[in-house]
Amino acid sequence: MFSSKLLAVVVLAGACTLSVIADAAVPDTPVAPAAPAAPVDTRADDDIFLLLREAARQDDAVNAAAYAARLPNYAIPSYVDYYRLKPRLREASADEIRAFLARYQGSAIADRLRNDWLLELGRTRDWVTFDQQYPLFVLNDDTQVKCYSLLSRAVKGEKVAADARALLVSPPGYGDACAALVATLAQAGQFDTNDLLAQLRLAGEQHATGPARRTAALLGATETRVVQAVDLPALAMARGIGSDRVEHEIYLVAIGRMARTSLNLATIALQKNAAKLSAQELATGWANIALAASMTLSPDAYPAWQRCAGAPLSQDQLQWKTRIALRQGDWKMVRATIEAMPAQLRSDPAWTYWLGRALAQDGAAGEQAAHPLFARIADQNSFYGQLAMEEMGQQVSIPPPGRALAPAEIAPMAANPGLRRALKFFSLRLRFEGTREWNWELRKLTERELLAAAEFARQNEILDRMVNTSERTRTEFDYTQRFPAPHNDILQPTTQSLGLDRAWVYGLIRQESRFITDARSGVGASGLMQVMPSTGQYVAKKIGLTDFVHTMLNDLRTNILLGANYMNMVLANSDGSQPLASAAYNAGPGRARNWRATLSGPMEGAIFAESIPYPETRAYVKNVLANATNYAALFDNKPQSLKARLGTVSPAGARAANLLP
């Protein structure tokens, strides 16, 4: 269902405490003053505020000013001021912007405005003011701002090429800032031809036509030719390989793009021109074909990766080469490829774990070398942390709870201005703003205070924030916060009647909706179990729910009934494999069947999960199975094995139910 990244607008209703707090005026200053009186007509003011927000989002300064003028005493004055100022940011004086930042210093919205201002300062190349403001940008999570920061340093003559190479890995998101950085570094001699060709390959790999065209211009190549290579690879290939290194690389981009449509045509074209290519260029061509083949789990992927020695591989290529090596059981290739990754990528828990597994293939000495790698991630209660624990002879268990929270510890959370602003936003269905305010406050809290904030979220029935907040602790734990089991009175009878593993069902719900009962996804999935309308219709018909209409998905009992029955169907269709069934629930039974059809024999469940072609489904399956293992430990009160739950995924056999289209 691809719902984990697509959660958009949700309603958090039915919480009395939330309603009381949200309707109160919310102070914007770090020091809480005496609570002001509630607005006279809160609902009308809320409607005006939503119109103000939309006007600001549309850069409609006139209407934004008009709506803001009608909210002189609104509950969240900082956001009224922000939405009034944001559409005028290009015309506003530096003094006006600084006054806003001073007025709301230390708040999430002040940091948001500073982010906006830094983008404008970078656009106008006001490096003096930019350099003053950039160190004050707390979150520093905007790639465009980071590119402007490097650009500011580069125009002063600083050497920033190494930092730029680490940052510039996603051309579709470059925009003006990163494009200008690439051009400046090229003109200053900090980026050489190899750097620009690497950018060209990335742009082709990620189908980023604009960055590819700009990079081609920096290389002195014909922009039309590179645009054809990215968007019309057959035409670019028909025009021939060209005569110099840059033209060869453009041709190889076309080979990679064509391989997404036809591996056969791309392979024939590469082989036809092999004699005209250098050894490295030929290896690059095979790497481009191998990446495309990997994304469909084609049997052609592994031999293509074997032929790419010497090619400069992108991060995506390195990861897919490792996944295909895992599927082939080529542990030497697994080890060599992970060790060739940049240090930051190599430190990812996935590659830390698989490098440990690869080292452990070399007997006692290898196992000894692997142990520190497993130990490095074993304290992370995540998919690979749990697997690393098992490699060290431990299983997943629930740590003992800490000292019970006293009401006096929770009271400061209820008085926290940022958390109160978050509750107000949740009551307005503005989940993005509410989450930003909530998470901003968490940065300042001790572990004990995090548990108190999580409990405050529970009291207000904001279970997703409870889970997220509680997950941040490292020394004191409350797994009833991290892995709640709400609506068990409805869910348990349903799972029992179907013979479903309740831990797996809760593990899936935790990933799907984070227990937001009326969650909506961008593709139309609804409710606790994020059931698509078409899926609901299909399942309702199968179980004899004759009066089903789509709006019934918003009913908690109906949502659980249909979601659990659908889980039961995909599980039967998957011969009882929870990894395969979880993939089917998220991406659809047809895709899961296709992935299963690529298997030539039983495959370790963890390898199957790691090599799922869709990034979201890959993360989804890992999270669901890790969640389920924790729930099982919580429900059964005894250690659990993630490896046992993963099991092996086998090719479809006679027992496959084929219940689903």
Image (spheres, grey):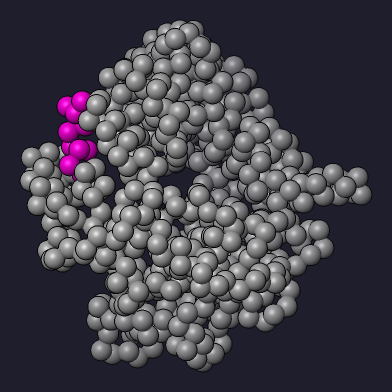
- Give x and y (percent) for residue 130: 36, 22
Image side of residue 306 versus residue 268, left or right: right
Asked if one can make out residue 69 in the rendered structure from this viewpoint, the answer is yes
- Give x and y (percent) for residue 175: 34, 29
Image side of residue 206 versus residue 223, left or right: right
Q: Quadrant of residue 179?
A: top left
Residue 145 drawn above or below residue 611:
above
Nearer to the camera, 83 or 637? 83
Residue located 50% across and 23% down the image: 164
Residue located 55% across and 72% down the image: 406
The stretch drawn in magenta includes residue 90: yes
Image side of residue 590 versus residue 66, left or right: right
Nearer to the camera, 48 or 638? 48
Residue located 50% across and 41% down the image: 292
Q: Which residues are magenta?
A: 83-93
- Give x and y (percent) for residue 543: 39, 88
- Give x and y (percent) for residue 452: 52, 65
Quadrant of the drawing holding the C terminus: bottom left
The stretch drawn in magenta includes residue 249: no
